[in-house]
């Protein structure tokens, strides 16, 4: 019978740790929404700002680039900026959320 009580205490402790970790995760995700990455392509002709939650916040295109009339170049620079911003925002998220994965113990390994 003593083993059952020990398991119950262990289960309560584990649930408390999981709840604390969930709260930290929610806070970290909220913080990520406020963090941004700022990417430029084409020597600054295209600028894109993206949040850590991968929400595009701002796109700026230099008027001179549009005046050049090279639509394919504009499209390529925008595409490049988007892909670079996504990669950087994913790295930012991994940096911010990574320490929380350690709080999972053996459950968090292997991912």
Image: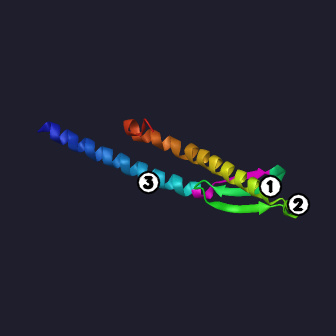
Contact, CB < 8 Å: mark 2 with mark 1? yes
Q: Nearer the viewer, residue 98 or 42?
A: 42
Q: Residue placed at 14% from the left, 37% from the top?
A: 2
Quadrant housing residue 23: bottom left
Q: Secondary structure at mark 1?
A: helix
Query: Label 3 crowding class (10 Å Cα cut-off): few <14, some 14-19, many 20+?
Result: few
Q: Nearer the viewer, residue 69 or 110?
A: 69
Establish if 73 lies above or below 5.
below
Query: What is the spatial separation of the Cα atoms under label 1 and label 3, in whole angstroms?
Result: 45 Å
Q: Secondary structure at mark 2?
A: loop
Q: Residue furthest left?
A: 1
Q: Which residue is mark 1?
A: 73
Q: Nearer the viewer, residue 97 or 50?
A: 50
Query: What is the spatial separation of the Cα atoms under label 2 and label 3, in whole angstroms?
Result: 51 Å
Q: Quadrant of the N terminus?
A: top left
x and y percentages locating residue 70 in the rendered image: 84, 59
Q: Is residue 19 magenta?
A: no
Tell whether 85 sits left or right of 47: left
**Could you tell me if residue 38 is visible in this image?**
no
Q: Secondary structure at mark 3?
A: helix
Q: Which residue is mark 3?
A: 23
- The magenta segment is 33-41
Q: Which mark is residue 68?
A: 2
x and y percentages locating residue 106 in the rendered image: 38, 35
Q: Residue placed at 52% from the left, 42% from the top?
A: 98
């Amino acid at each position: 019978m003593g083993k059952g009580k020990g398991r119950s205490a262990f289960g309560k402790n584990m649930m408390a740790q999981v709840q604390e970790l969930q709260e930290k995760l929610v806070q970290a995700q909220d913080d990520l929404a406020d963090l941004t990455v700022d990417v430029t392509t084409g020597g600054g002709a295209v600028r894109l700002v993206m949040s850590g939650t991968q929400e595009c916040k701002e796109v700026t295109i230099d008027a001179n680039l549009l005046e050049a009339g090279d639509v394919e170049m504009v499209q390529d620079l925008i595409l490049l900026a988007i892909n670079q911003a996504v990669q950087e925002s994913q790295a930012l998220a991994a940096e911010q959320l990574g320490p929380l994965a350690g709080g999972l113990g053996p459950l968090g390994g292997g991912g």
